[in-house]
Image (spheres, grey):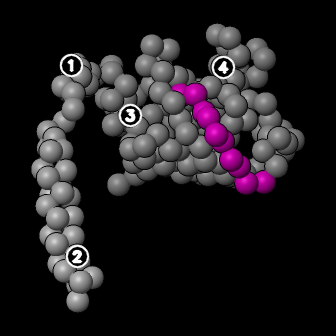
Amino acid sequence: MRSLGHRAVALPAACLLAGGLLAGCAAAPRQKPLRTTAVDTGTTSMEAVRRQLEGSWTLVSLTAFDAAGAPKALQATGRLTYDAYGNLELSASLADPAAAGPGAGALAMKGRAVVDTSGKRLVMADVMGQGAVDTLPATLTPDKVRYYAFEGGTLSLETRDGTRVLTRTVWKKAQ
């Protein structure tokens, strides 16, 4: 009977102690919020470019340029998808792979596209590809920076060697 008495006193005492400790905890944040500035959403801001890129795009044209800068239109089909988190997925195939050079034919890759608004560039990171990406012509490899331009309802992406354009793809937003 004696041990029952200790339990009868110990349990309420423990509850009161726990309640007192919990009541002493602060319910408010421990520090003031940081002062920040609003996100720039102007037409040339990173946020605006990401919003323009977001969605699915269908390939309209693919042009390769030779060493003299002469353009050569290549028949191709493709789909590009960019999501709100910067993930880019691209799949494309050429109607005549031999026309583009050895290793060309089909390309399937996905990775993150980092937007550089000052240089109007998309820099690919964490790229994974299907097939032998290393057999692609140097002008189409995923490590190439893509220079972007929005013209009306189209997106133009170029790979360059210095100032010389190597390839240009034109994409139209899929409906």
Q: How many marks?
A: 4
The disc label shown at residue 50, or none: 3
Mark 1 neighbour density, 10 Å: few (under 14) some (14–19) many (20 or more): few
Which is more foreground, mark 3 or mark 2? 2
- Per the rendered image, the range of residues in magenta is 122-131
Residue identifier under label 2 = 6
Callout in the foreground (3, 1)? 1
Provide the residue designation for mark 4.
160
Q: CA distance from mark 1 to mark 4?
A: 41 Å
For residue 105, say whether it is visible: yes
Can you give x and y, in whole percent of width and height, for residue 75 in the image? 65, 46
* Label pair 1/4, CB-CB below 8 angstroms: no
Q: Which residue is mark 1?
A: 35
Q: Earlier in the sequence, mark 4 or mark 3?
A: 3
Foreground pick, 36 / 118:
36
Q: Amino acid at mark 1?
A: Arg
Which of the two labelled residues, at mark 1 and mark 4, occupies the earlier sequence position?
1
Closer to the chain start, of discs 3 and 1, is 1
